[in-house]
Amino acid sequence: MPRHVTALLLSTCASLGCAPDAVEATWEVQFASPDLGARAARVDAVVRRGGCNSTVEVYRATFDPDEGGPDLPALDPGTYGFAAQATDEQCVVFAEGCLEVELPPSDTSLRVVLDERTQTRACPAVACVRGICAEVPDAGGAMDAGSDGGVDGGVDAGFDAGDLDAGPYDAGDPTMDAGRPDAGRPDAGFDAGPPGPPYVPSNVPRDLFWAGTASVVLSPTDGTVIVDTDTGAITRRSDSADLRPAGVVHRLVPQLGGAPDLGAFAVEDFVVPEGVTVQVQGRAALVIAASGAVTLDGVIDARGGLRSPDNGGAGGYDGGTSLSRSGAGPGGGLSEMGLQDVGGGGGGHLASGGRGGARALAVAPAGGSSNGVPALVPLIGGSGGGFGGGGEYAGVGGGGGGAVQISAGTITVGPLGGVNAGGGGGFGGDEDDGGGGGGAGGAILLEAVRVEIDGAVAANGGGGGAGADRADEGRAGQAGRLSATAAVGGATTGEGSAGGRGGASGAPAGAPGADTAGTGMDDNAGGGGGSGGRIRINAGSSRIDGAVSPAEGLTMGAL
């Protein structure tokens, strides 16, 4: 990242009670660009025990960006969210960031980057004094009606009990407190707080909760609906009819560190009835930010390979081809195109992808390595499988599964509903070449005050493609399934060896592709299976009676 503007330095003793073997760590907050740093009037820094979405604060400080803040207290080992946001002279919050860290840290330099976010006021303009939200006296200003009815113990109560109310200020003009500004809308909104669910969503600004003023309620007759995360289009596949109401807001939200953009849809409710499939396409990961309820009696399908075998799902990475060879992404499966008839490696995510099948003395290419973080911040899909070996007719690697985040008031997944972010299956080899590796399963993040799952939520890996049977194309691996059952690799046919199964519950790593049975020129190995992906549920309360796969990839967080 070429932009470095240091905002402040904090030090922390990340150990039990700062014992002699304590680990000293520094917390550095940076702005993503010089312009953002120049605009900042103050920085609010918070440390939350439990992670970025936790409400348990162990440290809070507000300070001038040029001066920095006080040292942190000693922190016990565990997971913490180091968060900060920047406010300008007009009390507008314009930049924020959070880093989730397991203490003691492996890297003693903790860096949180504050990047641009949707601008919101920290308080009404009348209460802002040089970037600080100040108390306003009871003199007929716009805050009185709201303060008396909502936060009397804070802003107004302090002044009502003090000299200002008892003195000549109120006595001089008895009409001031009864004036219309006291009952005005600015105060009522300030005291009631912003609308939407009472938590800060992962990866996106909270104002998305109230940006949408319409609901997406699909009809049982819509069949297959296409949601494009890049353009914001919501269309029915059968006739390209526009199904996006005018009040639904689409916004592209960038992520840091090379992670894919987020295609965020702000809605009131989002309803998918039974029998309807929402296919997600685009490079950006899908985010649904709903102020109300998300009800899935149908399926959201963000698998890799929906448009072509090597195509990554939305927010996922492409599989390897004759041009790119190895799969894309941090856990891309490897390819050895120059080695005779070996299989491509499967993509890695939660675990490693399966290695490609070997032929004779040719060393099989490895599967991709595990990667990503349990909190799914940033939100990243699965990596692609590797291209098979032997020549240009080898099987392409399966695309990595996509990434889906649903942040809402409530989330309900019905018995026949689900979210599928499975990896794509590797393609079979052709013309005496090896099969492609399967794509890794993607990422699914569900967060709501209440989450109920009776259907399936799955990010399973795709199966590897089989090697060619001489001049006949090998069978493709299966894409990640919407269940706890693993995707199967392409089956053995003649001289073509089978692809490895994809990762799922009970065995999250991809299985290796089958080695060739013989050493002849017509023997062709199968591609490795893709690893399973990651699933995160942040909830006030939850009930899970359906399938969540891979179960080993599920982590839970509290709101």
Image (cartoon, rainbow, N blue to C red):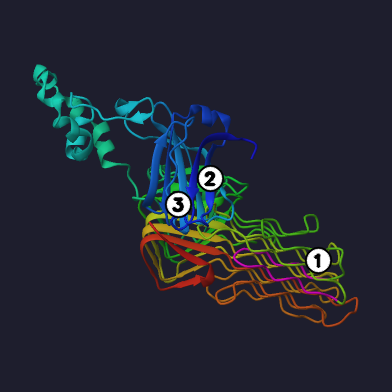
- What SS does tag 3 mark? loop
- Residue 494 x, y percent position in the rendering: 81, 82
Q: Earlier in the sequence, mark 2 or mark 1?
A: 2
Q: Which disc number belongs to residue 26?
A: 2
Q: Left or right: where does residue 182 sit relative to residue 399? A: left
Predominant secondary structure in magenta? loop
Q: Left or right: where does residue 253 sit relative to residue 540? A: right
- What SS does tag 1 mark? loop
Residue at 70% across, 67% down: 346
Q: Which disc number belongs to residue 52?
A: 3
Q: Left or right: where does residue 275 sit relative to residue 437? A: left
Q: Which one is closest to the eye, mark 3 or mark 2?
A: 2
For badge 2, the amino acid type reads: Thr
The residues colored magenta run 342-359
Q: Is residue 233 visible?
A: no
Q: Of residues 298 and 420, which is closer to you in this image?
A: 420
Whether 102 is drawn above or below 71: the answer is below
Instruction: Name the residue tied to disc 1.
Output: 394
